[in-house]
Image (cartoon, rainbow, N blue to C red):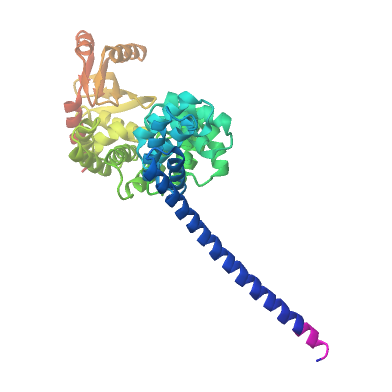
Amino acid sequence: MGILLPVIIVVIIIGVLVFVFLRILRKKNKSDDGNKGDDRNTVIREANRRLSQNPKDASALFSLAELYFKEENYDKAMKTYQVLIDLCSTNADLIEFDLTVRYAVSALKLKKFDAAYRSFLLARTMRQDSFEVNYNLGTLEYLKKGYEKAFSLLTSANILQPEHIPTRRYLGHCNFKLKKFREAADILRKVLDVEPGDKEALFILGQCYFELGQNDQAVKIFTRLRADPEIGPTAALYSGTIHLNSRQYAQAAEDFELGLRHAGIKKETALEIKYRLAAASIKQQDLGKAVSLLMEINGEVPGYKDTTGLLGRYRELNANHNLQSFLMASPSEFANLCRKIVEGYFQGSTVKITDISMNKNDYLDVLANVSTSRWDDVILYRFIRTTGQVGELYLRDLYARIRDVKAGRGFCIIAGEFSDGAKQFVEARLIDLVEKEALLKLLRGLSQREN
């Protein structure tokens, strides 16, 4: 007990001292707050007293303006700075540049952008080396879409304060708008090093990579941003487009579908996503889904891009499996379909196919020995995968091929139509032209035989 007594005494003394110190500190803080209130009231009271005697008392007005500005009462600050600016011509003690900047900042805080722009512009005629003026004026020029002027002003601001992140950000945005994608990417990467959560900077960086053809880096960014409620739909449109262009159709469809799930998506963005999702569905041969999307688009905006033509084409293909295979199936499926057409082209004939050759998935040549009860001949069939118009050049090439293989006749079969020049070319040659309607008849006969 004798040993513990001194320790207990020391603890009690320390506790008392801490208590006294906290009481003193609390009183001091209250006193400081009171002094602040007293100081503010003193400033207002003194300024009003002087203004009652002289409404243009510059010192009193300046005291009030600075107080309002410090308290973020920008409406009163702006009005008071305007009075002071008007007094500059008769009062050499007032610094017009400083007052004009304060007025401009107050207007900016109140979102009176036109007034802020005019005042910053005026301030820059007085001094061109002010960071605050160059940065704010550059930002306002950017918002006005004056990207060249914004770039110049922000470059000056960046030289004055190289580590100011908002300046860098807008400078990166300006470079992007001016199509200086490499420079924009360099700046935005530095912004993101400091502020990795800046989604807008990240999105524009992704667009820079896209424009520069650096699709691997771009798609990583857009995929990451697909879930964002604001940027997500457009990010999904970009990532889906990259996958669509690289023939990753399933991944493209996933991107587009994620984009369409966002609430409040802009109409123009939704239309474009649906249009490209329809394209991905066509590539996956999901024509039912593609037709549904195209109908939806056409219902919202009739004639959007080429939806009317696409709808007419793919609605028919969706209803005709063999025509779909003719135009869209894999080379092996296409070749198998063409073989069946050749074998049944002449009823009651005996057909021996001797050669099948494919040219870049554009057309297929089938060479066959055909025997009927009345004639025997070597025939070259050319199947062209198009719904458009075929001209004379295709027929000239076919005619040369017929001569090379020593065929007696030729047939050119398409899902479109032949030009007048093509028809004139075959008038004196043993080449038969089979256009869309005749092809559809052949395909219907094929379907009947299969059933």
The quadrant in which the N terminus is found is bottom right
* Quarter of image, res 14: bottom right
| Residue 319 relative to residue 172: left or right | left
* Quarter of image, res 364: top left
Total marks placed: 0
Can residue 243 be spotted in the picture? no
Rendering coords of residue 268 (x, y %):
28, 38
Residue 356 falls within the magenta-colored stretch: no
Q: Which residue is more in the foreground, 451 or 396?
A: 396
| Residue 66 relative to residue 14: left or right | left
Which residue is drawn at the image coordinates 19% and 21% (left, top)?
374
The quadrant in which the C terminus is found is top left
Rendering coords of residue 120 (x, y %):
43, 31
Residue 7 falls within the magenta-colored stretch: yes
Can residue 415 be spotted in the picture? yes
Range of the magenta residues?
Answer: 2-8
Using the image, determine if residue 396 lies above or below residue 114: above
**Which residue ends up furthest to the right in the rendered image?**
3
Which residue is drawn at the image coordinates 27% and 25% (left, top)?
386
Using the image, determine if residue 315 lies above or below residue 17: above
